[in-house]
Image (cartoon, coloured by chain):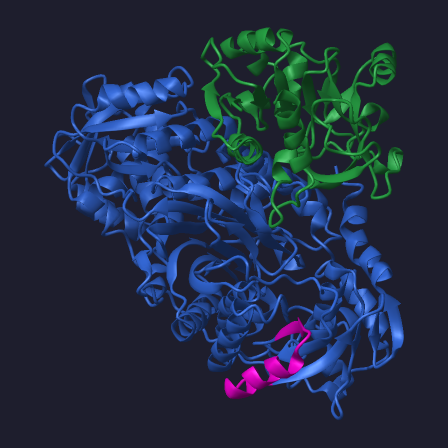
Chain colours: A blue, B green
Amino acid sequence: MSTNQFNSTPITPELVKEHGLNEEEYKLVLEIMGREPNINELGIFSVMWSEHCSYKSSKKWLKTLPTTADWVIQGPGENAGVIDIGDGQAAIFKMESHNHPSFIEPYQGAATGVGGIMRDVFTMGARPIANLNALRFGAPEHPKTRHLLSGVVEGIGGYGNCMGVPTIGGETNFHASYNGNILVNAMTVGLADTDNIFYSAAAGIGNPVVYVGSKTGRDGIHGATMASAEFDDDSDEKRPTVQVGDPFTEKLLLEACLELMATDMIVAIQDMGAAGLTSSSFEMASKGGVGVELWLDKVPMREEGMTPYELMLSESQERMLMVLKPGCEEAAKAIFDKWELDFAVIGTLTDTKRMVLKWHGELAGDLPIDPLAEASPEYDRPWEVTPKQDRIDPASLSGKVDHIDALKTLIASPDLASRRWIWEQYDHLVMGNTIVRPGGDAGVVRVSGTNKGIAATTDCTPRYVMADPVEGGKQAVAEAYRNLIATGAKPLAITDNMNFGNPERPRIMGQFVGACQGIADACITLDFPVVSGNVSLYNETNGEGIMPTPAIGGVGVISDLAHHATIGLKAGEGALIMIGAATGELGQSLYLKTIEGREEGAPPPVDLNAEKRAGTLVRELIELGAVKTCHDIADGGLLVTVAEMCMAGNIGADVSLPEQGSEAAWLFGEDQGRYVIATSDPDKVLNAAASANVAAVIVGQIGGDAISIEGDAKVSVSDLRDLNEGWMPSFMADAT
Amino acid sequence: MKSAVILFPGINRENDAIAALKQATGTQPTLVWHGETELPNVDIIMVPGGFSYGDYLRCGAMAAKSPIMRAVAERASQGVTILGVCNGFQILTEAGLLPGALMRNASLKFICKNTHLKIETTTTRFTNQYGKGDVVDYPVAHHDGNYFADEDTLNRLEGEGRVVLRYCDANGAVDTETNLNGSQRNIAGIINEAGNVLGMMPHPENAIDPLHGGIDGRGLFKSMVEAVS
């Protein structure tokens, strides 16, 4: 075959470079092809080997993460992870980033992120039942922050609300390191029957390859390649690479797919996400060990004059690729006709193990499948250990702000202020099963028609990971675990969304390696494996990287919703008990940053064995019905935790001080592995803790309408709430 | 007691509606696809919430032209009890079964939260289980719930006792402070002249369960059941 018989575009070194392939990678392309590729084939190599699709910098380390447990049905490698939640049902979930597009075009970037992750979940046969999102923005004072926050929140709401899936939780951070690279990580949890889960491995030579959903347009071409490079000052010019979402079509696609999945017609199914038709067709063929012939002129097209190159690389949304059983085409098409969606047979499976692209009968490309999908480059990039920082000695605090004033400042700070402004723009009640709404430790939805609940949370404390990637990686997993426990759920598995800077810098690669190690350690000890995930690298602008942000999405199950816990204090509860030990860790704490103006020190270490003991104890107390109110101690420490419980329950509390040691370290230290619970029977809780070898101590009493410290220095709960609720609405009031 | 729930493409609270109707009537409602031209013989018809046709063009505008809406209008004229919630309210106004229109919220943002509502009349077939002036708590979840009608229409609605629900605070105060979406005169729900069609933005079907959104919404469904039995 001549090298360019079906395309006249000359393959120059510049063109290769524009496609994000370096010299060595291009050499490998020539080796695999045995000739010079044509432009269509070059485009396919470009997206398949982009960092975004190939995980070439990260996969060496991702392989070290624990991915198995008795309840794991499907670990990483499919569209989403699958866990058994009992009674013949499975939870299917994943978190995925849409960082680069959301910075360029916040509404559509965030919206299509939500649409993409929901597709990943319903591709597997699950109805999405909960959405969450983990968001990081630049400093509040940065001129773009309001615009980006406003657009991202509207985009998430615009898509998720229309889909009719409740958005039940998430987290939002502000830090200057995200000024040029915001993070938008969207998570979806779906519910399926364990005997009706769909996978992507194509099978059955001669079976039809079917395209359903929206028509293909020119949007999002090279999106995956864009997401694999740093930004510079001209990033705004990349707007045309951002996809445009249509949640109405996705809602129809969801209903049509679930209707088809209730029949027995599907062999394999895969959504068209990053790298569109290329990625979906190669993955399905590679997993099934078959070949594919695609008739690209049969692809439903939105615009005239589209080329094979554009059709293979478009990231138009709301599309699926399926392999059907032979003879099912008409019956399947009837379902998509009912939902007014395109349905087209665009190819067939072959035994060649090659991807053959046809355009009006002419050959437009011919590539081997496995070498592209499986033999993509894998790099062992050089990395450096992040130097350890010193523990902060409480004696170094200035101590010039009294504790109640510090509480008032913290609770109204961008880090801790209420996120109500955000989550009231999300429909968190649709489907009628939201049992714990946003604003608590984890969101909880009921499994429809049962008294079982699924709890979900997203967590990461980037400033800890920055200071110590290993401890920070552990902490992110431990906090997700703790947030699930605090609702009474048994934590089952996580999805990880690894957001980092440029992996070609050893310092950044060291953060990635360290975080993986910490995550792996925590997953093993806590029996909390990784079942799905996503990596987003090159989150840098002009050489400045983000704080390392391995966002963890955790999922757990509450076996009986009659016994679950919420953070709000309830009348009749007397004592506040702190579960878990504290030595007063102030390194990287919000107190140190906000009150003392110091962003430094070793983050609080995570004792995973103590974490597990404390978690098991708290969950058992909630399951027994002995505890109805629980909140984990996280950002801001003990006093902030108690204040949040008071505000949520509209009841005051008095907090006691330690007999010795730093008061500030006691009240504001961020020691890990801790919870505050409220109970009318403290002896029962203290005895249970003693027999479980878990530290527990009474730290206060509830009552009244103010928060006080040993009887004085009060602030009323309603004043504190005004401070806590006031910051974000007033910050966003002049959003444009 | 039979009921039906109309399903348009893009509707997403049909199962919430079904749960509430089932709880109140004791029987499973029939789900009717928008492309149908006939309705089963039922006592209650509910047009649920969501984003019919993606809210493209105008909320409810395209659904109002669906084949099934001719049948719904016919039943309305026959006096069948019809409840439209959220997008359902928008569809009923676009179909001309209720006066006025629902515009963008004054904040221009989607709002999902629980809100207090004042029961303005208990003589309707939707509110006979409540006391006059009762304050109930239902969630809202909408982007376009800002009720608008001209002054003459508003005066007529008021004069004929057709304003059924208004946004208020926990004490029943109805003022600009408690007007969550900018609606004229804090209007959250109205009935037609004959009194058999109610359109409302808040979601009583999401207030039927102590674990989910409280149980204040049960009264509205029970009222319909009492009225037609």
Q: Residue at 51% of width from left, 49% of height from top? A: A446
The picture quadrant where one finds residue A139 is: bottom right
Quarter of the C terminus of chain A within the rendering:
top right
Residue B222 percent location from the top left of the image: 64, 32
Residue A183 visible in the picture = no
Left or right of A430 on screen, residue A6 = left
Residue A683 in the magenta stretch? The answer is yes
Considering only vertical position in the picture, is A295 above or below A455?
Answer: above
Toward the viewer: B163 or B188?
A: B163
Toward the viewer: B132 or A341?
A: B132
Residue lying farthest to the left in this orientation: A351
Toward the viewer: A314 or A34?
A: A314
Numbered range of the magenta stretch: A675-695
Residue A109 visible in the picture = yes
The picture quadrant where one finds residue A350 is: top left
Q: Residue at 69% of width from left, 82% of height from top? A: A698
Q: Residue at 55% of width from left, 32% of height from top? A: B13
Considering only vertical position in the picture, is A605 above or below A302?
Answer: below
Toward the viewer: A322 or B52?
A: B52
Residue lying farthest to the bottom in this orientation: A660
Residue A545 percent location from the top left of the image: 56, 59
Residue B5 percent location from the top left of the image: 52, 23
